[in-house]
Image (spheres, grey):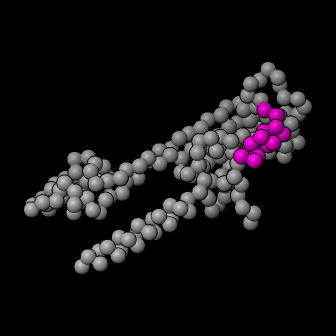
Amino acid sequence: MKTRVLKPLLLAATAALALSACATATPYGPAGPDSRYGYSDQRITSDRYRINFSGNSVTSRDQVEMSLLLRAAELTLESGNDWFATVNRVTDRNVRYSSTGDPWYGMYGSYWGPSWRYYHRGYWSPWGGGPWGPGWGPGYDTREIDRYEASAEILVGRGAKPADDANAFDAREVVQNLGPLVARQAAQ
């Protein structure tokens, strides 16, 4: 009996560890039909663009913001310009919570006893997770998962960048400084 219960649990734990080891940050590259993660841009006028970079749950806020600035610099150079200024720039944080139950808690935790079935989650709570609701409280591992998305509207220009604008960047300098720090997509 114990083998029939333990074997599937061990297989599930091994699969979960294997999947978590494969999780990597969003590589720098265009978002496409297969993935919503990466950059996208849109020309608004001849000298103005809107750029977005969306990272997955493993991509840090710094990586998302560096990727956005790198894309702005590359787009500036691709359009034949030398500098760009961020007109507005926003980074959004999307949070969700993931809970997993501990299969051993119900057997060996504080609910175990002669009348355990009356106190076990699912029997004494209409939510199935104790008074905390589903996925919360004793026997659960709850973790916060963050995902960042940055967007900016940029103004591009030729010549020397405006010296009096703190939001203006030399595109070549940005590519030189941030390019090596950003992980790129593998060549296809």
User: As drawn, which residue projects farthest toward the left?
Assistant: 114
Q: Residue at x 36, y 57 (%)?
A: 100
Is residue 104 within the magenta segment? no
Name the residue at the right extreme. Answer: 159
Residue placed at 60% from the left, 53% from the top? 25
Q: Is residue 166 above or below residue 51?
A: above
Q: Quadrant of the C terminus?
A: bottom right
Q: Position of residue 154 (x, y in %)?
A: 74, 35
Q: For this view, does 170 lie left or right of residue 114?
A: right
| Residue 76, visible in the rendered structure | no
What secondary structure predominates along the stretch shown in magenta? helix
**Residue 104: horizontal and vertical position, in percent?**
27, 62
Magenta span covers which residues?
A: 169-181
The quadrant of the picture occupied by the N terminus is bottom left
Residue 179 belongs to the span the image colors magenta: yes
- The answer to whether 158 is drawn above or below residue 33 in the figure is above
Foreground pick, 30 / 8: 8
Q: Is residue 152 left or right of residue 57?
A: right
Residue drawn at 41 percent across, 49 percent down: 143
* Residue 67, image x, y percentages: 69, 45
Q: Quadrant of residue 114?
A: bottom left
Q: In this orientation, does residue 114 appear?
A: yes
